[in-house]
Image (cartoon, coloured by chain):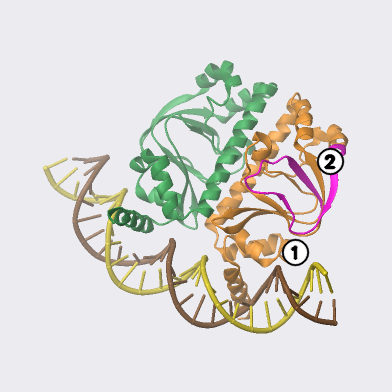
Chain colours: A orange, B green, C yellow, D brown
Amino acid sequence: MFFQFKEQLPHLAKYWDALMAMHQRIEVPAKTILLAEGEVSKKSFLIEKGCLRVWFNNNGKDTTFQFFFENEGLSSLESFRKNIPGMFSIETVEPCILHVLQKKDFDRMMDQLEQEPAVLKEMMNVVMERQLHYMKEFLSFIRDSPQERYLNLLREKPKLIQRVPQHYIASYLGITSVHLSRIKNKILKDRQI
Amino acid sequence: MFFQFKEQLPHLAKYWDALMAMHQRIEVPAKTILLAEGEVSKKSFLIEKGCLRVWFNNNGKDTTFQFFFENEGLSSLESFRKNIPGMFSIETVEPCILHVLQKKDFDRMMDQLEQEPAVLKEMMNVVMERQLHYMKEFLSFIRDSPQERYLNLLREKPKLIQRVPQHYIASYLGITSVHLSRIKNKILKDRQI
DNA sequence: CGCAGACGATAACATATGTTATCAAATCAG
DNA sequence: CTGATTTGATAACATATGTTATCGTCTGCG
């Protein structure tokens, strides 16, 4: 779905400058919708500064699927690749500096890359790594309680918790912000004893 | 993670006979564990007859991740590819007739295939399709109530519900078998009114 | 055939989580 | 600076789901 690529694609190195030259640098305020759920994605993004979140409409409620920060890249991959409506919205959480790649430029680049088995192999690895990542997220979602997932986040991505408003974090954990408040309170009390 | 490949890989056609010749045909009784969670996967499977389920240990409880039936194939992909312990167990639900491919034979085949961009491209598509499939499962898991998910299953895979014991279905839906009983009862009552 | 284990329904009770409403603090925009 | 908006905490109550235990039925194996 979403990816970070520079380090993972060494065979892409010789194309890197050309690829970056195709990108356009833009600055956008917080809460800008870069892609709306149900639209066909025509762009991919690299984050120079700021934070994005990917979310979807869950029967009227807003459920965050993933967060992205500096030096990460993303696109609504299945929408991008197949020209079908995406399942997610992409939105800035903070004011951001982004580098945007148009799909037509991406496709032009892909026509070249597809002739190179080494690059294709790397790309397949990236895609599989992504899949493994989402699989683990899914497992954690099922297997761990919301409190455990919050403690995991605290441990593994403390910056995320500092930068992102709590109701987004709650929706990412699959709970309401009220419940997240209760969890934080409970953790506090447990610590004091 | 898991895949079905024949139709999706037309460029593989000329290798197909060789690939099938590498498989070994076996018959196994119900409740046979083909791969245990935490083991490194050395085999992939094609199902000629019967039903498999993929599950993981969820804090002592057994949670079903996916079911497979006739003409479908699977392996614990990330374990298979990377020689790391798999996150899932694979187990027969019914007596099965399977075709088994050893990893070393698979690798030998891959060495050839990797030289062909057309095949690699198809494989990447298969992997991405899988990813899209799991993404949709994940969305449904979050967005739909257990009752809705059960009704979806009834509509989309009625055979599954007939063939698979209810507690496996319950664990697949993310609920207890007691709760699934309640749901079935509720659906009955709703129909009668 | 007959029995042990698997399977499914149900009741009573416990717990986790959602909903709605209210309030205070923090932050942002004009 | 100041009013509006966002954010976070909390309480009261409602609902969904889990847990444990019991019971009847089915089914496959010896």
At a point 81% along the width and 34% down the height, the residue shown is: A12
B185 lies left or right of A114? left
Of labels 2 and 1, the one closer to you? 2
Q: Is residue B79 visible?
A: no
Q: Which quadrant of the rendered structure holds the N terminus of chain A? A: top right
At a point 61% along the width and 42% down the height, the residue shown is: B84
At a point 55% along the width and 39% down the height, the residue shown is: B76
Q: Which mark is residue A96?
A: none
Dot 1, how many residues are within 10 Å of its Cα: few (below 14), some (14-19), or many (20+)?
Answer: few
Q: Which mark is residue A163?
A: 1
Q: Nearer the viewer, residue A8 or B139?
A: B139
Q: What is the chain letter for disc 1?
A: A
Q: Which mark is residue A23?
A: 2
Asked if marks 2 and 1 fall on the same chain, the answer is yes
Magenta residues (range): A20-49
Q: What is the chain letter for disc 2?
A: A
Q: Amino acid at mark 2?
A: His
Residue A64 image position (x, y, % from top left):
63, 56
Along the polypeptide, which appears first: circle 2 or circle 1?
Answer: 2
Inter-mark Cα distance, 2 to 1: 27 Å
- Rendered view: C1 above or below B96: below
Q: Quadrant of residue A42?
A: top right
Q: Which quadrant of the rendered structure holds the C terminus of chain A? A: bottom right
Residue A159 image position (x, y, % from top left):
75, 62
Residue A90 image position (x, y, % from top left):
69, 51
Q: Secondary structure at mark 2?
A: loop
Q: Amino acid at mark 1?
A: Arg
Q: Quadrant of residue A173?
A: bottom right
- Rendered view: B5 above or below B40: above
